[in-house]
């Protein structure tokens, strides 16, 4: 876990707690930090509310070997920390609260944490997604149930383990575990795995991997520690228990959008809908990025790219004539002759984009 921001959200911030930020970014994974790097670097007054998991999913990701430019690999937490420092270096302010309320139709927009509220002219939502749970008895409270092989797999070197799921994420988990574990059982409820044929073929090359399709998980067994997975095959009568020391659950991700129901348009799976190939949401001045809008790729680099896009979209939106930002500059008597060359607070504020 990254060290929490030493600035809790409820601490009065200079000049006042009710200061209106140019941009508030909710979430501190690659999407949120990248958005902050861009908006703060553009001179926009940027607040990042980091949530319960500063650094986001990268903290659980273990070694990352596919993020460009940091090879041969970098640990997820180290990558998150580098992004965070870069955002801070450009002047983004970070605070450690967790947003519980959104008022996205207000001008300015308001987000509420447990003990404070913050106002921003534009809002970037980057709350990511959470692992979907199996919802079976024993899943909670037993040691050895994990959602990250890269983080926890090494603890089960030489042991028998199970991976639950049938998509690319599950096969990736099994591929990571195969060289470590004595035996890996991949359990999927459907007749066929959904993962790419190439990944499945790579997995089938491992002699210590068994793939059990059409198999439903009924419960996880154990006394404090996992000792087995109770399963029901749709092909053979009768239930059975597979003895394992750990279970890696990889049955998908759920976008963290509950609090936004009724505020912005979502698809049936809870992803925030964005418009016309941009990061604009159905609410004016509200942008969304990362796994929260991504049904398909969900990688650190794609989240970072969409954080960048959200920042550029927000910047462009704030640069339009009569935007909340330019109106406020006008009220301060600093109306620019040429909005694209505006200088504000001593820094270049508005860039011409596109
Ligand atoms: C186990 C694992 C391994 C992975 N391995 C790789 C890999 O090898 N390579 C790769 O490219 N990708 C990998 N990924 C995927 C990658 O980590 C994610 O795609 C990426 O982190 C998504 O970024 P994000 O910024 O959209 O969301 P997240 O990283 O999920 O960050 C979301 C942020 O939002 C915050 N938040 C949530 N709700 C609130 C709220 N209400 N108020 C305030 N803050 C809030 C959280 O605290 C968190 O900081 C892995 C993911 C996992 C789980």
Image (cartoon, rainbow, N blue to C red):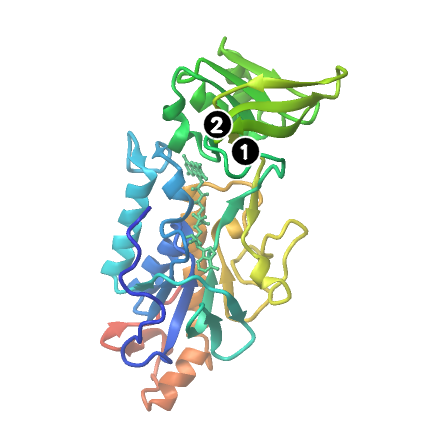
Pick whichever, 265 or 206, lies toward us: 206
Q: Residue at x 38, y 80 (%)?
A: 18
* Figure disc tally: 2
Which element carries disc 2, helix, strand or loop? helix
Q: In this picture, is 196 found above or below 322?
A: above
Hey, which quadrant is residue 74 in on the image?
Answer: top left
Q: Mark 2 touching mark 1, by CB under 8 A?
A: yes
| Spatial CA span between label 2 and label 1 | 8 Å
Judging depth in this view, the residue of 320 and 219 nearest the camera is 219
3 or 62, which is in the foreground?
Answer: 3
Displayed quadrant of residue 43: bottom left
The image position of residue 153, as x and y in percent, is 41, 26
Dot 1 alpha-carbon crowd within 10 angstroms: few under 14, some 14 to 19, many 20 or more: many
The residue sitting at 56% across, 56% down in the picture is 257
Q: Residue furthest front?
A: 223
Query: Does the residue tagged 2 have its C-beta within 8 Å of any atom of ligand 1?
Result: yes
Quadrant in which the C terminus is drawn? bottom left
Instruction: Give the residue drawn at x 36%, y 68%.
Output: 9
Mark 1 secondary-structure assignment: loop
Residue under numbered circle 1: 250
Q: Quadrant of residue 36?
A: bottom left
The answer to whether residue 154 is above or below residue 124 is above
Relative image position of residue 287 (x, y in whole percent) = 50, 63
Sequence-wise, the earlier of marks 2 and 1 is: 2
Q: Position of residue 152 (x, y in %)?
A: 40, 30
Badge 2: how crowded within 10 Å, few (<14), some, or many (20+)? many
Residue 143 image point, x, y percent: 46, 32
Residue 302 visible in the picture = yes
Q: Is residue 96 left or right of residue 133?
A: left
Q: Does residue 275 appear in this view?
A: no
Residue on which disc 2 sits: 173
Please tell me whether residue 281 is drawn above or below residue 131 in the rendered image. Answer: below
């Amino acid at each position: 876990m990254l060290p929490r921001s030493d600035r809790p959200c409820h601490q009065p911030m200079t000049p006042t707690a009710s200061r209106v930020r140019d941009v508030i970014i909710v979430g501190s994974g690659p999407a949120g930090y990248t958005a902050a790097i861009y908006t703060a670097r553009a001179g926009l007054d940027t607040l990042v509310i980091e949530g319960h998991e500063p650094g986001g999913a990268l903290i659980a990701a273990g070694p990352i070997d596919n993020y460009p430019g940091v090879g041969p690999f970098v640990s997820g937490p180290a990558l998150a920390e580098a992004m965070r420092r870069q955002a801070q270096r450009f002047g983004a302010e970070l605070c450690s609260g967790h947003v519980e309320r959104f008022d996205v139709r207000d001008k300015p927009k308001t987000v509420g944490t447990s003990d404070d509220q913050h106002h921003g002219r534009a809002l970037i939502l980057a709350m990511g997604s959470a692992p979907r749970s199996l919802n079976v008895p024993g899943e909670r409270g037993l040691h050895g149930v994990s959602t990250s092989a890269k983080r926890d797999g090494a603890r089960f070197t030489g042991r028998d383990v199970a991976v639950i799921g049938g998509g690319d994420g599950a096969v990736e988990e099994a591929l990571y575990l195969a060289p470590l574990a004595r035996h890996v059982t991949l359990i999927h409820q459907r007749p066929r795995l959904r993962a790419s044929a190439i990944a499945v073929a790579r997995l089938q090359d491992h002699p210590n991997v068994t793939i059990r399709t059409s198999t439903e998980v009924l419960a996880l067994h154990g006394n404090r520690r996992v000792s087995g997975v109770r399963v029901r095959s749709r092909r053979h009568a009768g239930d059975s228990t597979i003895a394992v020391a750990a279970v890696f659950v990889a049955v998908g991700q759920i976008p963290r959008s509950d609090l936004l129901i009724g505020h912005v348009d979502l698809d049936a799976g809870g992803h925030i809908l964005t418009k016309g190939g941009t990061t604009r949401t159905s609410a004016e001045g509200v942008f969304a990025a990362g796994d929260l809008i991504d049904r398909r790729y969900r990688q650190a680099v794609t989240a970072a790219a969409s954080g960048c896009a959200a920042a550029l979209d927000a910047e462009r939106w704030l640069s339009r004539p009569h935007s909340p930002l330019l109106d406020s500059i006008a009220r301060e008597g600093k109306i620019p002759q040429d909005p694209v060359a505006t200088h504000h607070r001593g820094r270049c504020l508005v860039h011409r984009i596109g």
